[in-house]
Image: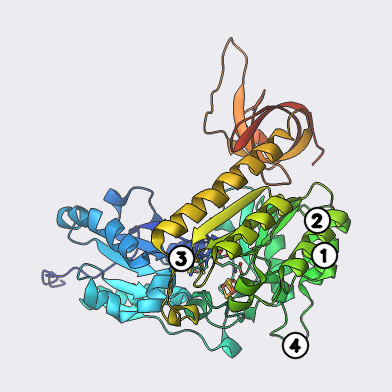
Amino acid sequence: MLEPAAPQLEPAFDAANQRVHVITHGCQMNVYDTHRILQVLGAAGWVETSDPTLADLVLVNSCSVRDRPEKKIIGTLSRMLPLKEAHPGLRFGVCGCVAQQHGESLLKKVPYIDIVFGPDRIADLPEIIAENRTGRRVAMTELDDPSDHAFLPVDPTVETGPSAFLTIMKGCDRFCSYCIVPYVRGRQVSKPAAVVVAEVESLVRVGVREVTLLGQNVNAYGKDRAGEPSFADLLARVAAVVGLYRVRFVTSHPADADDAMLDMFGSLPSLAKGLHLPVQSGSDSVLFRMRRGYDVARYMDRLARVRRACPGIALSSDIIVGYPGETPEDFEATMSLVQAAHFDSLFSFKYSPRPGTAAAKVKDDVPETEKAARLARVQSLQDSISARRMNGYLGSEEVVLVEGPSRFARVGGRGKLRTEVQGRTSTNVMVNFGIDRVAAEARGRLVRVRIDEVLSHSLRGTVISWEAD
Ligand code: SAH
Ligand code: SF4
Ligand code: F3S
């Protein structure tokens, strides 16, 4: 007869059926990384929960590009501290770019953070958790050597909708003066094109119809790896994948945006009609000090070229106001550029010094009130331009890729099935419309819709026809 096992004071940690709740800040790269975190944990038996009160691990996937990122993390986690009292097994973790930047010091500073790991350490997460369960708080933030960085393979089954992100490169070599990304994400490493294409094919097999290729500077794709195609050639290979309806990509850098890439918008039917081309400033002297590697004339030439290749393309951009030394005249030059460029949308930010960057060594001399006033002016100018561009959709016919039920979903009514669904135009504008079938049947389909109503950030329309699959 077996002896009964001795009672264990600390039950051995078993990952099976542990629950993780992830809060994602920052850019699409972090959204993509969150999927990889769920993939790695899923393989170890974890399940995702959208309810932090049910979680055994709460992770904040953080961003350090602006503002006070540490404060944001501490704010989020401190609000959840009562959950730790209710569930003593609950652990808090920080990953992403703030984790990479501060590493172990986050553990020292914030006593209730249990684990810290950087973007290159996602594959090590099961070991990090296991080590933490032995009672140690763990920080792991080594960046991979660019020569042997291995991208985590994509498990397409973690995708839940018809649209998916796909990282095609990591890091950035441009070192714009204000930007922390090269420090927290490391040097540029491109994913081999054959892997990119195979991953797109695997996504299409599970029903993905639109892929957004991700990189901090996708136009420099392949330049770090002998034998890889250019970004324009990679786009052509991805666009040729059968069953993929749309390809998008972010982010393009104006200095590296070559003619071949811009002209693709006129020749690849599945390349969605949208380009995000961050300009940052409309002043040549500010652009020079930002180390952006182009001037206003070159930037406007890029816009003109892509508009020639693809009339009606939706263009968007990023602006930083209040960069050190930005004079009122520099700022007026930015206003003129925004007026002339006629962007569909614009993301604008107040300059925020980032530790370790070149710009942080220069005095942050534009007062906060002036930054706020400049930001308000550029945003209000863009609001009127965006409104005009949105009004241009009225009465037009758009091909919409259906994502799923609309936020205002309503089903039924007078005995007839009526479902509200939402999807995006090729130019990436959200459209809501009613259909006479259940949302699941429409998801991932292309529908031709007439636009009847323009709201501030979305459109409403009526189905004209269903495109053939
Ligand atoms: N790789 C992209 C963008 C990376 S960060 C590119 O090259 O454009 C996204 C945006 O954040 C940038 O385009 C910039 O407008 C803004 N940004 C980056 N660092 C910033 C800082 N220190 N202060 C304010 N805004 C910043
Ligand atoms: Fe930052 Fe410049 Fe790289 Fe963009 S291109 S991530 S702004 S350093
Ligand atoms: Fe932020 Fe890191 Fe992306 S700093 S913008 S989450 S690469």
Q: Position of residue 287 (x, y in %)?
A: 63, 72
Residue holding disc 3: 37
Marked residue nearer the N-terminal end (4 or 1): 4
Q: CA distance from mark 1 to mark 2?
A: 12 Å
Marks 4 and 1: CB-CB under 8 Å? no
Residue, x 70% and y 62% (percent of image)?
200
Going by the numbered disc 3, the residue's amino acid type is Ile
Residue holding disc 1: 236
Marked residue nearer the N-terminal end (3 or 2): 3
Going by the numbered disc 1, the residue's amino acid type is Ala
Q: Quadrant of ligand 1?
A: bottom right
Q: Residues within 10 Å of mark 2 (few under 14, many from 20)?
A: few
| In-front residue for pair 304/125 | 304
Q: CA distance from mark 4 to mark 2?
A: 27 Å
Q: Which mark is residue 319?
A: none
Q: Residues within 10 Å of mark 3 (few under 14, many from 20)?
A: many
Can you say which quadrant of the picture contains the N terminus? bottom left
Going by the numbered disc 4, the residue's amino acid type is Ala
Q: CA distance from mark 4 to mark 3?
A: 30 Å
Going by the numbered disc 2, the residue's amino acid type is Val
* Image position of 426 (left or right of 92): right
Residue holding disc 2: 242
| In-front residue for pair 392/214 | 392
Marked residue nearer the N-terminal end (4 or 3): 3
* Image position of 420 (left or right of 12): right
| In-front residue for pair 88/16 | 88
Marked residue nearer the N-terminal end (1 or 2): 1
SS at circle 1: helix
Q: Which mark is residue 226?
A: 4
Q: Residues within 10 Å of mark 1 (few under 14, many from 20)?
A: some
